[in-house]
Image (spheres, grey):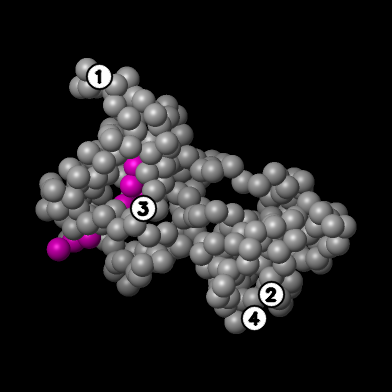
Amino acid sequence: MASIVIIGGGPAGLSAAIYAARANMQAVVLYQNGGALEKTEKIENYFGFEQAISGPELLARGRAQAARLGAHLVQAEVTGVEYAETGFQVHTTAGNYAADAVILATGAPRAVPKIEGVAAFEGRGVSYCAICDAFFYRGKAVAVLGNGEYALEEARVLLPVAGAVTLLTNGAEAPAVLPEGLAVDTRPVRAVAGGETVEKAEFADGGALAVSGVFLAYGTAGSAELARKLGAETEGTRVRVDERMATNVPGLFAAGDCTGGLLQVARAVADGAQAGLSAVKFVRDAK
């Protein structure tokens, strides 16, 4: 059976799963949490509910509906997506999943840490994609800013290429298990500094680490980060899609808040439905 993997378990992702499952596709929903909806106390503007409903209750109903229709829901962190021999391979903390099509629906991104110089050096030593930019740092010292599985996955990509890789946890505790060869510095980061390009990471205690590049992998990989790794077009933190919720990468779709626009449940559900139907059509046409 053809497989459609949906990354994100909010209203957009669950809606996509419902439509994919009803089309007799193997729909897999990979999610960490319910995103913004899970934190919403009361919803009064969603069609069909005479009385207000809480975000967690609406989310629970959506999950139950998707599961009843045959979708497989897996709570795990997605650390990367790459092309496979046929389709895609989605890497998670719970194993890898093969997919004929992928739908990104992780919601709007979290704020990145406010570190001086990060925005100023974007494209000049600050990167959000190790797979995209590791080549430019062959034999050079680089740093990865983050402390979760996403940051470790970025470090694994860089280790065989860069001269030295240091994980900057920005004051957080270092992961218990580290890839061989990865250095760690847990000091809070004050700034990314340099001249024309990045030259160092400066710490709050006055110290510094000489690096040619800083890769941001703070928190978990969002839709824009995953899209960039596959060559999909983005605008800032927004994934660019057409009216079918398709990206410029065949088989890759996006839905909901990660595409920008009206950040409302009704819009996310509609986007998810369209993405699900478009993914189904793509898979069927490819067979």
1 or 2: tag closer to the N-terminus: 1
Amino acid type, label 3: Tyr
Do tag 3 and tag 2 residues touch (Cβ < 8 Å)? no
Q: Nearer the viewer, mark 1 or mark 3?
A: 1
Q: Nearer the viewer, mark 1 or mark 4?
A: 1
1 or 3: tag closer to the N-terminus: 3
**SS for callout 3:** strand
Residue in the picture at 46% in, 62% down: 79
Amino acid type, label 4: Gly
**Residue position marked by numbered label 4 in the rendering:** 181
3 or 2: tag closer to the N-terminus: 3
**SS for callout 2:** strand
Tell me if 194 is positioned left or right of 123 in this view. right
Residue 31: mark in rendering: 3
In space, the residues marked 4 and 2 are separated at their CA atoms by 6 Å
- Image quadrant for the C terminus? bottom left
